[in-house]
Image (cartoon, rainbow, N blue to C red):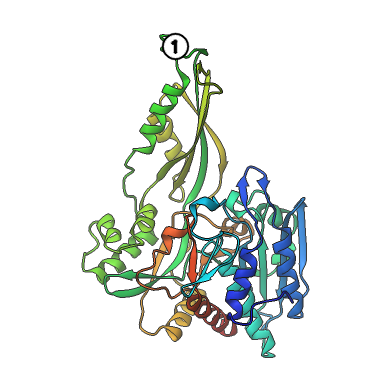
Amino acid sequence: MPASAPELPEVAAVARDLIRFDTTNHGGGRAAGEREAAEYVGEYLSGLGLVPEFYEPIPRRTNVAARVPGRNRDKPALVLHGHLDVVPAIAADWSVDPFEGVVRDGMLWGRGAVDMKDMDAMILTAVGDILRAGDQPERDLVLAFFADEENGGVEGSALVVQDRPEWFDGATEAISEVGGYSISVGDRRAYLLQVGEKALVWIRLVARGRAAHGSSFHGDNAVTRLAAAVAALGRTEWPVELTDTTREMSARLGELTGAGSDDPDAVAAAVGAASGFLRSTLRTTTNPTGLTAGYKHNVIPDRAEALIDVRVLPGTEEAALADIRRIVGDEVEVEVVHQDIGLEVPFSGDLVDAMVSALDRHDPGVPVIPYLMGGGTDNKALAALGIAGYGFAPLRLPADLDFTGMFHGVDERVPIDSLVFGQRVLADLLRTY
């Protein structure tokens, strides 16, 4: 078993240990790799008497999984999954070393504390609680920890589903990140349960022109052409389009805020720190995230490129791409770099009821509200196997903590008490569902 600090609850110590593995993923195949973190997870699973299996289709891009036998093996298996990679962190921007796993002010700090080594630790220790007590979960569990999620799972979950589908035999449902956490609605607390994800469409804009001296009178400048297209797309105010999930979310939040549900934007804006996160779920978003052009100050280049992170509501991918091409104009090419699916499942059924009930047992009387996440998870890869995915990483958070603002942000941190809460809720759910 990997060493853990005795002064920390186990769940926080495991999360800290995982943060200390630099699993930075720059995308496009440029990554530190998840191997050491996966080996740590495998050692933990072995310590519980489980038999981990590893799959490394690309050097250092390591995935690990194990099956936990349940009491009732006639029931469909449940997948609990997380990813081991993290987005880059520029250390100079942080107040702590992003890979040190600093504990300060009752919180665990570091890249991955929010996305998603906190949930990885909660999964491991919740299962550990059950097995060390000599108990079993109600049904078979498939524990899976993937590589490359921060690059759309191209070198992680997509390859696992393609090449190791037997890992998920008998599974029909899955739970993972970005749901189950609390938000502040006025002076009240509520939990968000993720039952959908927007589709991801990463595009590259390419503008071409004529190379020339930087001092020339020049009307065919690729950089100027690209800049106009990027500005037009980045400033587009996409209209609100409701799905079944966001319609119900707006109605329930409207009741809590007293704002009604006639204006979903106004309802989401009334939620406080989470408002930006929720407003993104109501519409297409097109955010410029990278620019590449030129090679010398006095040379006008003949090509300029921009990266745009596009997130669209399920089923609207082609319509959104058509709108994007219209906005940027005929002189700028739109290349699709990566595209995946959107998801939406009902806010109903036995698993949803079980998750809601587990939260209520540990935080009685607090409402649970469905939402459709603006980002994506490895649930999309599992959908190819017919597995319905939910976001349920239960965290009871302080009212003044901007938790959603720390996804891919600076100074990621999570309260240690919240991790302990999540471990207990998950263990409760797994014992009873």
Q: Which residue is mark 1?
A: 215
Would residue 276 be found to the left or right of residue 305 on screen?
left
Q: Nearer the viewer, residue 33 or 255?
A: 33
On the rendered image, what quadrant is the N terminus found in? bottom right
Would residue 34 be found to the left or right of residue 206 on screen?
right
Q: Is any atom of residue 167 visible in this view?
A: yes
Residue 103 x, y percent position in the rendering:
53, 71
Q: Nearer the viewer, residue 3 or 393?
A: 3
Question: Seen from this angle, which residue lies furthest top?
Answer: 217
Task: Give the vertical position of 418 relative to 64 (above or below).
Answer: below
On the rendered image, what quadrant is the C terminus found in? bottom right
Query: Which quadrant of the figure has residue 246?
Result: bottom left
Task: Give the vertical position of 94 relative to 390 (above or below).
Answer: above
Residue 215 x, y percent position in the rendering:
44, 11
Q: Nearer the viewer, residue 359 or 207?
A: 207
Q: Secondary structure at mark 1?
A: loop
Name the residue rendered at 75%, 79% in the picture.
47
Q: Is any atom of residue 71 visible in this view?
A: no
Query: Which quadrant of the figure has residue 229?
Result: top left
Name the residue rendered at 36%, 79% in the picture.
366
Q: Nearer the viewer, residue 403 or 354?
A: 403
Residue 164 x, y percent position in the rendering:
74, 59
Name the residue rendered at 62%, 59% in the picture.
382
Residue type indicated by callout 1 = Ser
Q: How many marks?
A: 1
